[in-house]
């Protein structure tokens, strides 16, 4: 059996002459929690909409839950949950009416789960949707996406509008629903701390391509920052393999490198008669280094 | 200093206002440009009134949108240039129309007075609470003026002026001067209102759905009390999975179609009342080719086609969330089919409601005896016309823009106006007792309209299935 819930191959998508996705390859394994990381305008939402069949591809191929997303069947959609970046959610309805309205589309709807989440997330079932704050609407949208206990949950910057408490609760809910490893979650974000808390894999989208996709721990292990102090002034370019960013100031240098190993460190020590300190980076630092900021 | 005024003027270069205005201009001016002398002064007046009214409404919308914004508070000397530019445009507009009428021999004072009156009405359209009153006012006045426009087209010798307009236009000093002064006071009131516009005033948040953000804002302002009791009861009856039957699902989709039934009811009742106030008070139009025309007949032509069309336009508001909704468990063709049927059901409800209201009107108020066969033709024609309008709207809605829908309607020859004019002609045949002899022709025309609508709807369905809903 194919273990991939999402498979993409050389996906291209552009709008009015501007190419947003330039050959995206991303395979998401069953049971994983994948954080899709990228700067504003990197194409995260476009990629997600292509994955869900909301946009038609210019080129390439996507398989979602074993089907072509452009012609996704009702059966596949029953296994899919989606929270868009912005959703208005029928402003004239009450919270409980939106829940009932949405739930009526699904043959399997976990009413108990929704009632519990409404309580935990402090949503008033009798409140109208229209006056809800952005964060409350976001909570409601997330809740609606969880009601049918989807096998694949796709969230487009789900926590962007949530306050820290709600965000923590949301992340806890994600951990809870994925604890049995039966569900897959793909969520885009630029809040790296959220990603570190729940994701086991990370995909980084840059310039229309996935520049990194692997386990989060492996990424952290592979990207390091070297603090180099040499006996004599260093050249402006150190030519260290896997360099992401390099700052040289006289005899001192700060170099961020990928796929570091002991041989590289020893080579630096010998070549410039230098002391080298290897430092770990958190995900935010790694993300910044990868974007040369 | 002039930079600020230039900047304010530059804001008018935007598709949201320029496309509908250009389309409107073409639709309105086409008959003038293609007609030959001698020109019908009353017809030119009617067109001028309609144009000033709608143009003023667009101007008012635009300037309010500029001022109902944080920029007007935080930026120095922001409001004045916008208001001055809007007033300048307005002045140029009514002066042009006044001069045009003057050339054809009308009183300059009278013309200035009635155009100012229309301008004042148009400028205030976006300052009513609830907003639907403003829309109703605009639609009501535009329908009235529109009637004045259409009747001279049908009958060159028609004497369809409102008495009050005739009086002002004749240049009688007292009515004309009074109207002009009152209009200036109303316009001044509008300026004062704009100068003091702030977030705590209801109209600050009123938007028209010209852009995507406006559509979102419009949806957001639909408040709790706009949910009709019947709809709440339908929610209460929801018990889990709605099932896979098409009819059940269509009824379910309808729940998410915005409270169209409620809005249609409000519009219907209000327009009906406005219409009666107008037709009963003024007795327009008086006759067609020597045959008296009861007001109820004009009501049919105006509203039986217009309101269902408005209902379909409400579905455009759902457009922004279609991507989200398309991930409900159903295939894309099924989604398009069911949403289309839900919209058609809304239209049908409004149509049926109007037919009943109209029938009662004719029977009780106007006491016109219609034979069953005549009634059949009328119903057939209104069905054909509505199906045609549904097809046109379904096709245009694919472009996710109300601007395009409205502009497109006007550009494709005025789907609404065409059917409206045909409807009016049909009724004159009823009045002249000539309909029965023309039954095959009208029945064929109705069927052709319906068929065109069905084909257009089918084509739209195919296209919708290929459309990106994200």
Image (tube, coloured by chain):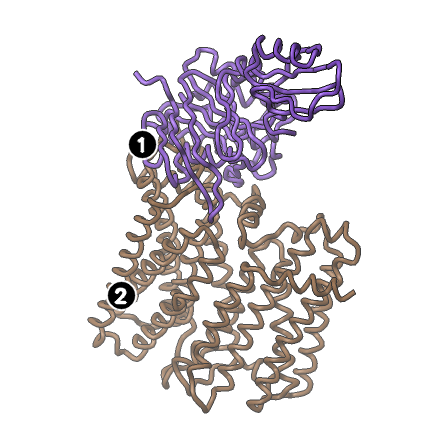
Identified at 54% across, 72% down, the residue is B51
Q: Chain of mark 2?
A: B
| A202 or B74: nearer the viewer | A202
Secondary structure beneath dot 1 equals loop
Residue B88 seen in the figure: yes
> Taking B307 as reference, is A232 left or right?
right
| B197 or A184: nearer the viewer | A184
Identified at 48% across, 16% down, the residue is A177
Q: Find residue B279 and report its horizontal and vertical position in percent.
A: 48, 73
Residue B446: assigned label: 2
**Chain that the image shows in purple:** A
* Label total for image: 2
Q: Find residue B155 and report its horizontal and vertical position in percent.
A: 39, 83
| Circle 1 crowding by C-alpha within 10 Å: few under 14, some 14–19, many from 20 | some
**Chain that the image shows in brown:** B
> Taking B206 as reference, is B331 left or right?
left
Which of the image's four quarters has the N terminus of chain A? Answer: top left
Q: Find residue B280 and report its horizontal and vertical position in percent.
A: 49, 73
Q: Chain of mark 1?
A: A
| B276 or A47: nearer the viewer | A47
Identified at 42% across, 35% down, the residue is A50
> Taking A72 as reference, is B298 left or right?
right
- Residue to which mark 1 is pinned: A73
Q: Quadrant of residue B337?
A: top left
Identified at 50% across, 15% down, the residue is A215
Which of the image's four quarters has the C terminus of chain A? Answer: top right
> Taking B377 as reference, is A3 left or right?
right
The image shows residue A264, relative to residue B159, as above or below, that is above
Secondary structure beneath dot 2 equals helix
Q: Find residue A108 and report its horizontal and vertical position in percent.
A: 37, 23
């Amino acid at each position: 059996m194919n273990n991939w819930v999402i498979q993409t191959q050389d996906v291209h998508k552009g709008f009015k002459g501007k190419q947003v996705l330039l050959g995206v390859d991303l395979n998401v394994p069953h049971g994983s929690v994948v954080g899709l990381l990228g700067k504003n305008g990197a194409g995260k939402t476009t990629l997600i909409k292509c994955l869900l069949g909301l946009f038609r591809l210019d080129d390439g191929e996507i398989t979602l839950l074993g089907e072509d997303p452009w012609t996704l069947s009702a059966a596949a959609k029953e296994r899919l949950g989606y929270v868009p970046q912005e959703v208005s959610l029928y402003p004239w309805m009450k919270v409980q009416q939106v829940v009932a309205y949405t739930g009526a589309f699904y043959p399997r709807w976990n009413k108990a789960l929704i009632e519990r989440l409404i309580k935990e997330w402090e949503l008033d079932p009798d409140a109208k949707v229209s006056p809800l704050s952005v964060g409350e609407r976001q909570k409601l949208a997330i809740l609606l996406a969880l009601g049918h206990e989807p096998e694949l949950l796709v969230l487009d910057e789900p926590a962007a509008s949530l306050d820290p408490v709600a965000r923590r609760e949301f992340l806890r809910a994600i951990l809870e629903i994925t604890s049995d490893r039966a569900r897959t979650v793909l969520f885009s974000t630029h809040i790296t701390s959220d990603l570190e808390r729940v994701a086991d894999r990370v995909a980084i989208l840059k310039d229309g391509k996935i520049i990194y996709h692997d386990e989060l721990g492996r990424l952290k292990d592979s990207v390091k920052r070297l603090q180099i102090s040499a006996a004599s002034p260093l050249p402006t370019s150190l030519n260290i393999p896997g360099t992401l960013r390099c700052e040289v100031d006289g005899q001192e240098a700060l170099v961020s490198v990928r796929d570091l190993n002991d041989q590289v460190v020893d080579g630096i020590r010998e070549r410039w008669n230098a002391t080298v300190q290897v430092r770990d980076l958190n995900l935010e630092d790694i993300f910044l280094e990868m974007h040369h900021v | 200093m002039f930079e600020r005024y230039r900047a304010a003027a530059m804001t008018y270069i935007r598709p949201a206002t320029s496309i509908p205005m250009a389309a409107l201009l073409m639709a309105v001016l086409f008959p003038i440009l293609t007609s030959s002398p001698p020109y019908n002064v009353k017809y030119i007046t009617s067109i001028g009134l309609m144009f000033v009214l709608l143009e003023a409404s667009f101007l008012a919308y635009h300037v309010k949108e500029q001022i109902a914004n944080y920029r007007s508070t935080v930026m120095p000397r922001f409001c004045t240039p916008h208001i001055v530019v809007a007033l300048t445009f307005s002045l140029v507009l009514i002066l042009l129309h006044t001069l045009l009428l003057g050339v054809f021999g009308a009183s300059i004072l009278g013309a200035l007075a009635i155009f100012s009156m229309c301008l004042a009405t148009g400028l205030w359209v976006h300052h009513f609470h609830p907003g639907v009153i403003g829309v109703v006012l605009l639609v009501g006045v535009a329908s009235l003026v529109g009637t004045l426009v259409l009747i001279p087209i049908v009958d060159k010798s028609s004497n369809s002026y409102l008495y009050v307009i005739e009086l002002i236009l004749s240049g009688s000093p007292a009515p004309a001067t009074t109207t002009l002064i009152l209009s200036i006071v109303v316009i001044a009131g509008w300026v004062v209102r704009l100068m003091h516009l702030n977030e705590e005033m209801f109209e600050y948040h009123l938007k028209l759905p010209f852009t995507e953000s406006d559509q979102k804002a419009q949806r957001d302002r639909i408040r709790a009390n706009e949910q009709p009791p019947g709809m709440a009861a339908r929610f209460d009856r929801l018990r889990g999975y709605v099932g896979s039957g098409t009819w059940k699902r269509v009824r379910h989709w309808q729940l998410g179609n915005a409270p169209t039934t409620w809005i249609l009811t409000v519009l219907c009742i209000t327009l009906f009342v406005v219409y009666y106030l107008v037709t009963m008070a003024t007795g327009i139009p008086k006759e067609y080719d020597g045959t008296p025309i009861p007001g109820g007949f004009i009501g049919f032509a105006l509203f039986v086609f217009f309101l269902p069309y408005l209902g379909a336009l409400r579905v455009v508001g759902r457009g922004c969330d279609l991507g989200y909704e398309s991930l409900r468990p159903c295939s894309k063709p099924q989604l398009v089919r069911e949403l289309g049927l839900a919209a058609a059901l809304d239209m049908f409800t409004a149509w049926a409601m109007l037919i009943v209201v109209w029938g009662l009107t004719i029977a009780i108020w106007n006491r016109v005896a219609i034979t069953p066969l005549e009634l059949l033709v009328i119903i057939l024609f209104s069905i054909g016309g509505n199906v045609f309008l549904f097809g046109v709207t379904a096709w245009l809605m694919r472009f996710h823009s109300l601007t395009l829908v409205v502009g497109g309607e006007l550009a494709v020859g005025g789907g609404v106006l065409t059917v409206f004019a045909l409807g009016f002609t049909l009724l004159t045949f009823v009045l002249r007792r000539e309909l029965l002899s023309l039954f095959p022709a009208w029945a064929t025309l109705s069927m052709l309209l319906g068929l065109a609508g069905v084909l257009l709807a089918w084509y739209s369905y195919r296209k919708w299935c290929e459309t990106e809903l994200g």
